[in-house]
Amino acid sequence: MNPQNLSAPSAYFLAEVSNEQETHTLSVVVDNEPGVLARVIGLFSGRGYNIDSLTVSETEHEKHLSRITIVTTGTPMIIEQIRHQLDRLVPVHKVTDLTVEAKIASQDKPLERELALVKVAGTGEKRLEALRLGEAFRATVIDATTEHFVFEITGRTNKVEQFISIMKPLGLTEVSRTGVAAVQRGPEGI
Amino acid sequence: MTREMTGAEMVIQALKDQGVDTIFGYPGGAVLPIYDEIIQQEGLEHILVRHEQGAGHAAEGYARSTGKPGVVLVTSGPGATNMVTALTDALLDSIPLVCITGQVPTQLIGSDAFQECDTVGITRPCTKHNWLVKDVEDLPRILHEAFYVATSGRPGPVVVDIPKDVQFATGTYQGPTVNPSATHKSYRPQLKGDAGALRQVVEMMAAAKKPVFYTGGGVINSGPEGAQLLRELVSLTGFPITSTLMGLGAYPGSGDNWLGMLGMHGTYEANMAMHDCDLMINIGARFDDRITGRIDAFAPNSRKIHIDIDPSSINKIVKVDLPIIGDVAHVLEDLVRMWRTSSAKADEAALKAWWAEIDSWRARNSLAYRPNNDVIMPQYAIQRLYELTKDRETYISTEVGQHQMWAAQFYGFDAPNRWLTSGGLGTMGYGLPAAIGAQVAHRDALCIDIAGDASILMNIQEMSTAVQFGLPVKVFILNNQYMGMVRQWQQLLHGNRLSHSYTESLPDFIKLAEAYGGVGFRVDKPGDLDGAIEQMIAVDKPVIFDCRVANLTNCFPMIPSGKAHNEMLLPDEANDEAVANAIDASGKALV
């Protein structure tokens, strides 16, 4: 039992204290079978949980295992619920709250990256400015004509967000983002 | 054992290998190959219902009264969609069901074919798990896995959707795995509780001054051992015990430490004990909103222990101090042993004072009602039914509404698995098919559906099933001509404007019984009740018993919506004004 609960008249009132919204990154290892993603996102919509970002791909081909990375926001009680609700889906092998794991290891956050393809169209000074800023953000040009660039940018979500917002006045026409992929720091796997 | 057979043969073989003796179903185009196997075999009895929802609830009644999984076989499209209510009902009440649905042939899936629907899509949120079988070679494994998932951990309904071409295809049949709980690749629920945490439970129980056991359907689901161990623990500790609607019978209603049911229509002493306790030991219950009342005033001075097999039940509604994940019977076995062998003892002096306080609440006699010599009071009808049936092997099912609450309050359940009711979903129309399911499993027992005049009409067609299979179920209708609970809420919340809660043209229930081939009774005088009940019991046929009761009786005591356990509306205080003002504006928004 949590020792701080011992003296409290009711733990319920302790829960009320930490009613602040937190953002957590969950890693969910699932059987790659038909409908598994529908089960996961159906759980979120059916129970009214938030999905800020969701990424999924098969990560272990021989075992047919996929890894779903979900960024979600809620009170600590809701986040705990989400973890347990996910865990009781039959094809789910393991649910890890990477944000909690990072805290336990005294780290700020888990390693999180996303990739965006950003199309910017324009000519003249705006075009040059877009190219200069792309270099400053270490974005790679993967397609270009005299009238446009497509940048590939990788990084934390806030870096990608910042890059996109800077490109807006310079002729931003299209963005495609992967959502967050995340792992823990250190040698251990989940 | 392995051998070649068709998908349809595999279904029958797998059911037999899983120990199934009865299935409830309704044929249709997409399950004809399986039905063709059913008629050519022995050992598996098929009960033909009149509506697929009836098959679902009958399977639930069978499952709840036996502890075994209920099995349903229905066709594609409407067959599957008609099952949705029963599946959801079973999910909320944790009833193990295996539902096999036919599906259009694989090459037609997605083409909006005749009687096609996305069965796995529709039933995904109302099952514990479901499968669409696209290859006959996967079928035996999935069928066995379906039984494992439905019955292990927190039980629940599963669906196996089998396209018609897979039923015709030939493949290799494999028997069940010996130990699926050890070999399943991802689903392995935890059964044993953590020993360190259990030692803390013993310490907390020894230190408690005002303890209460709050038990639920998990005790029943854990099997007869769970109920037996619970009784042992209660008698060892001397603690008071209350239960949810779903847990009635786990501890005997005639037991010394029994407080009665808790919650919205629970007893005053049960709810006050919950509110004032200093240690709440939740065993297999889930802090449902019918139980907790106003959540921020729920048992404010208590520490809470929660024993549950489903980790997602922990801290879902109420934050608890000490969670124990595990199966009730496994956990209680360890707990009883630890309590016996440790030096810990209950605080006798504190318990004595606690019981004195409880007795003062009990003295309020919160289930009291005004007897009447001219009109049958519904509570009186249940009391008489109990007195005249309690010495038999009796299974009681209910529909949903006032009659259900009166049955829970006034029928004393002394054994587990004898009480079949729709608790979580609150499904009107549950009771008659559930009684049929119980009667199929217990041919010589007395199976009574305590019904309301409105609910019974929701699955009345199953009378025909009861007659066909010689199942002498008794439908005991508390007929007040209203949807009683709806009317009560309209009185409480909506200025007594009784919008569409009065049934202007009820059928003649005697003629209705006779039309189906059963027997009908009607009683409207209290003095005639006992004799008629005895006659009903003596009839070896399905019976509809039209018990005309006082029309406008309210079900009390009651925790009004948005109120706490210690703010109950008691019957002697519930005058018209108190009833009209019982629920404030914020409570009105709640259900």
Image (cartoon, rainbow, N blue to C red):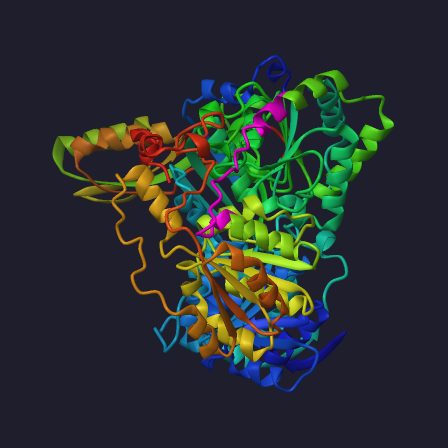
Give the vertical position of A124 relative to B302 (above or below): below
Q: Residue B217 at x, y = what percent?
A: 61, 45
Q: Residue A179 at x, y = what percent?
A: 39, 40
Please report the residue visible at 68 percent of the width from the left and 45 percent of the height from the top. Answer: B250
Q: Nearer the viewer, residue B64 or A181?
A: B64
Q: Quadrant of the N terminus of chain B?
A: bottom right
Q: How many marks?
A: 0
Give the vertical position of B172 relative to B146 (above or below): below
Q: Residue B476 at x, y = what percent?
A: 51, 61
A47 left or right of B68?
left
Q: Nearer the viewer, residue B226 or A66?
A: B226
B266 left or right of A72?
right
- Residue A40 is one of the magenta-drawn residues: no
Q: Quadrant of the C terminus of chain B?
A: top left
Q: Main secondary structure of the magenta part?
A: loop
Q: Nearer the viewer, residue B508 or A115?
A: B508
**Residue at the top extreme?**
A7
Q: Nearer the viewer, residue B477 or B48?
A: B477
Can residue A184 be seen by looking at this rendering?
Answer: no
Quarter of the image for residue A21 reads top left
Give the vertical position of B81 relative to B304 (above or below): below
Q: Which residues are magenta?
A: B357-379
Quarter of the image for residue A52 reads top left
Please report the residue visible at 45 percent of the width from the left and 55 percent of the height from the top. Answer: B427
Please report the residue visible at 50 percent of the width from the left and 19 percent of the height from the top. Answer: A13
Please report the residue visible at 47 percent of the width from the left and 23 percent of the height from the top. Answer: B297
Q: Residue A116 at x, y = what percent?
A: 34, 39
